[in-house]
Amino acid sequence: MPPLEMALSCIQELRLSSSVRFLWTWDIDTIGQLLEITTKVYTGKASDAELIIVNSTLSRLLPICTGDGDTVPAQVVLEPYIRQCQINLDALLCSIPFNLKPDFNNALAFYHAVSFLPACYRC
């Protein structure tokens, strides 16, 4: 996972930048809800569904949120964090039990996992 400051700055940029919000499809009611889930994940008190939501969101949000994301130094700094979020997401999805309770967080987590995974994972 990226450092907390980096994750929070991406969420802040999402809140402030209309172009980033335009590129982002939201199924979370508010950015505050995403901030709450992210805080739970970083404090270690999160469910599997919340871990999936945050890892999938950050793996897609980090490249979008860097203002100079096209530069080589930004890509070099971000790539390990993006890859770690994808590895975390893979591990979480492999370890989920088959008998999950049907609630909103689990449905949202699976939606995020399926729609935000890179195309190479869906082959």
Image (tube, rainbow, N blue to C red):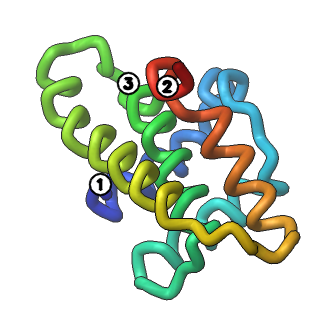
**Left or right side of 21 for 81:** left
Q: Nearer the viewer, residue 110 or 96?
A: 96
Give the mark, 2 or 3, whose residue is nearer the N terminus.
3
Residue drawn 59% across and 34% down? 116
Cα–Cα span, label 2 and label 3: 21 Å
Where does residue 53 sit, x and y in percent of width and height? 60, 56
Residue drawn 42% across and 83% down? 43
Q: Residue flagged by tag 1: what amino acid is it?
A: Pro
Where does residue 33 sit, x and y in percent of width and height? 72, 65
What residue did someone put label 3 on? 67
What residue did someone put label 2 on? 118
Which secondary structure, mark 2? loop
Give the mark, 1 or 3, whose residue is nearer the N terminus.
1
Residue drawn 45% across and 52% down? 89
Q: Residue flagged by tag 3: what amino acid is it?
A: Gly
Residue drawn 72% across and 23% down? 22
Which secondary structure, mark 3? loop
Q: Indicate the quadrant containing the N terminus: top left, top right, bottom left or bottom right.
A: bottom left
**Left or right side of 101 for 118:** left
Q: Nearer the viewer, residue 103 or 7?
A: 103
The mark closer to the camera, 1 or 3, is: 1
Which secondary structure, mark 1? loop
Q: Nearer the viewer, residue 63 or 14?
A: 63
